[in-house]
Image: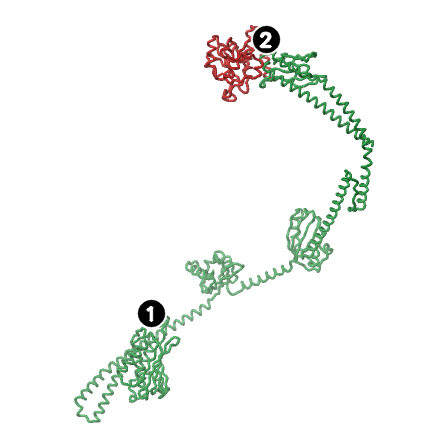
Chain colours: A red, B green
Amino acid sequence: MIRSTYKNIVMLLLAFLLLASQTGGDRDSKIKAAFLFNLAQFIEWPSGTFSESGSPLVIGILGENPFDSYLEEIVSGENVNGHPLLVKYCQTAEEAKTCQIVFINLPDKNKIQEAIIAMKGRGILTVSDKNNFISQGGMIKLIKKAKKISLIINTQATKEDSLTISSKLLQIADLAPLK
Amino acid sequence: MRIILLISGVILLVTSLSFFIYEVYSFRQNTIKKLFTLSQVIATNTTAALAFDDNKTATETLRALRAEPQIVAAALYDKDGNIFAQFKQGSAVADFPASPGIEGAYFNGADLEAFQPVTEAGRPLGTIYLKSSMGNMYERFRLLGITILTAIGLCLILTYFLSKFFQKSISKPILNLASTARTISVNRDFSVRAVKSGNDELGFLSDSFNDMLRQIQYQSNSLKEINQRIDKSEKFFRAITEQGSDMKTLFTPAGQPFYASPSIKKILGYSEKEFIDAIPELFHPDDLPEFVEKRSTIIDNPGKSFFIQARLKHKNGTWRWCEGTITNMLDEPAVGGFVSNFRDITAKKNTEEAIRQAEANYREIFDKTNNAIYILDIETGKIIQANKRSHEITGYTQKELFRNGGKDIFTDGKDYLLEEAIEYFKKATMGQPQIFEWVFKKKDGSFSWIEVNLKKATIGGKPRILAFFDEINERKKSQLAIQNLNEELERKVINRTVQLEIANKELEAFSYSVSHDLRAPLRAINGYAKVIWEDYQQVLDDEGKRLFTRIEDNAKKMGSLIDDLLEFSRMGRKEIQKSKVDMTALAELSLSEINSAIDHHADVKIHRLHSVTADPVMLKQVMINLLSNAIKYSSKTEKPFVEVRSRLEEDEIIYMVTDNGVGFNNEYVGKLFGVFQRLHLQSEFEGTGVGLALVKRIINKHGGRIWATGELNQGATFSFSLPILTINQNIKNGQFAS
């Protein structure tokens, strides 16, 4: 309780600082980072993903890191269902294969496509804010709509990778039309 | 009546009040519970909206509360405490707290407010706020109150009428029952029964009352029976106690007697009362200290007892030996004191004394007897007990005797003596009494002869060896003297016998040489007589011839005399060669030899004769001599008859040769068997007078006897006996020694 209060205060302070000094893009990044953290709580990975009950849940960032150190700060010391959260910065899709959530932030459309194909079938939740991410086979796209960040979920892709999305999450997200 | 109404009223009021309070309480609890359930549902459904900053969805979720008219307002606060979404019921005017309160439900005037955190996987995301109007609830409570009060009023009225009606039908039978009960308690008569009034509860009560009476009556009877049984049992045990010969006394914890069995009168002569007075001087002064000391060990120890033998004072002043126990039974509530139980053992004591006296007497005899007596262990041979005399004889004290069981003392430490002693001892253990003489060294170093008598005996229930030692030095001395004397005598006899034998031999040698030497001049006489007869026959006249013939005859006779004498003396030196002899055959052979030598007309009958072991050559000589004698001396009878018989006696065979001849004068029977002894004239019967002497010599040499019976002109019987030789006799006679 104290810990989370402390964290809240830190986050508020951060928010003020950011609001005072930085552009709206920074604020979006922070929200996206928080979303990435929150996503971990509403997703259920197929059995066998974690070798042990205490194995870490790794959030990978493939490509350039858009979150500065926000994500690490949010994640530090947290755990989901007993799995401590870790952040891993990856340059190649190969490196990201050991993660459970991968935020793809590659500049090139083709590179994104390759990454999605590489992750496919490994029970990895792919997240991105790039255009055409869903149509390329990505799972969750973060999109800015009416000044708010919202989610589009490709249920077909998550189903194919045996990832279970909480109905609560589905309730608030837009679902991508089935192909 | 009024009481009934009052009681009914209070009961109804309390019941209704409790019900009302319970109703209010449970309604409020239900409302709170319901409110929490609602807030829980909403919280669950708004986690994702909070997590992903979707207040539109959250607002929609809250709007579902339209279906719950009592919820007048609801709000959702985010993590930071800002209102995230809100809802108002219809046109209600409501405001929301600016920030979320602490989790829980609160009554706020007519409203109930509740805060509930929204969490996902235990992580706080925000807070839900619900406000419920309680107006309905208070309306409900008012209605409930009115209903209850009305019911109370109606109940009171109904109670009044009902009680008035039932009083009549209930009170009367109860009064009857009460009077019955009083009768029973006054008269204690449990056979009285209440009258049943009907089949309702009162009838049942009467039945139960009667049942109870029946049980009381039954229990009262069995109680009486039990009391009788206890009484009987008490009498029984008292009878047992008082009939016994033991004196039983019960004492209070303070030592005051409160019961004494009648047997005290029998043993000590006191009545119960006298006994109690006699107690202080009851114990013999010599036994009192023991009693006091033993009593102190039990006085504070319930359950403990002690045993004592003591002399108790009889009423007549004598002392009686008694024994018994005193037990502390303070822990036994039925007794609660000390129990003493004594019996008279004076007779037993007297017997013991008599036994002790007898024992002392035996001890005295044991010690004062002239023999040393030892009691030995049958296994080890060690001395267990020795009398005083043993000390006087040996010079050793009992201690010294016991030290090594007496072994060294009696065997002088010599192994061969020990072995010999053990041999005697072993035989004695097998039940053969041993008597032998023994020499042992006294403590002072002198030797002493003793006669030892070992006997197996049972002493103290165990098998023992009894050893009696009698000093026999005097006896031994005289015995040795006699022995020496005997030996001296024997030596003399042997010397004489040897001298006699030498003399006998010399005599025989002399007679042989005389006989032998006589033959040479006789042969010369015969030879010259023959020459004279042949050369000078014609010069002799008839008288000369007759005289010459006389000389020749006598010379011949002298020759045969010398021959017989030689034969006789040869017989004295001849060794007997024994074998089994068929006497019948031998007699017949002898007869046939006689028949071929002389002419006679005697009827000789030889019966079947017993066989014997003897020298056959010598026996043949005997048979020929006796047979020819019999034939010779019966030859002048008209019908000469000779008979040979035998008879078996205990240890000899007797052979008899009988004739019907001239017989002999019994006066001279002693001369019959002498050498050259004759009862008849040469002219009557021929003979040298050596034959029967020879026969006697042969028979004597065989260890037999010879004798004759007869009368003048009545015939004669010559009998001789030969011993039946047993092996023992053979050995004794030295026949088989070589």
Residue B127, x across and y down, in percent: 63, 15
Residue at disc 1, secondary structure = loop
Mark number for residue A91? none
CA distance separating discs 1 and 2: 160 Å
Letter of the chain that mark 2 sits on in the rendering: A
Q: Residues within 10 Å of mark 2 (few under 14, many from 20)?
A: few
Q: Along the horizontal axis of the image, is B592 left or right of B85? A: left
Q: Amino acid at mark 2?
A: Phe
User: Eyeballing the image, is B342 above or below A23?
Assistant: below
User: Eyeballing the image, is B7 above or below B482?
Assistant: above
Q: Along the horizontal axis of the image, is B93 left or right of B679? A: right
Q: Along the horizontal axis of the image, is B304 left or right of B271? A: left
Residue B439 appears anywhere in the view = yes
Letter of the chain that mark 1 sits on in the rendering: B
Image quadrant for the N terminus of chain B? top right
Residue at disc 2, secondary structure = helix
User: Eyeballing the image, is B85 above or below B714?
Assistant: above
Residue B237, x across and y down, in percent: 69, 53
Q: Which residue is mark 1?
A: B737
Along the viewing direction, whichever of B130 and B324 lies nearer the viewer: B130
Along the viewing direction, whichever of B510 and B17 lies nearer the viewer: B17
Q: Quadrant of residue A174?
A: top right
Along the viewing direction, whichever of B609 and B113 lies nearer the viewer: B113
Query: Of discs 1 and 2, which sits in the foreground?
Result: 2
Residue B623, x across and y down, in percent: 31, 80
Looking at the rendered structure, the number of numbered marks drawn on it comes to 2
Q: Amino acid at mark 1?
A: Ala
Q: Along the horizontal axis of the image, is B621 left or right of B55? A: left
Image quadrant for the C terminus of chain B? bottom left
Along the viewing direction, whichever of A79 and B535 lies nearer the viewer: A79
Please give the name of the residue rendered at 73% of the width and 48% of the height, measured from the top-left corner.
B222
Q: Which residue is mark 2?
A: A16
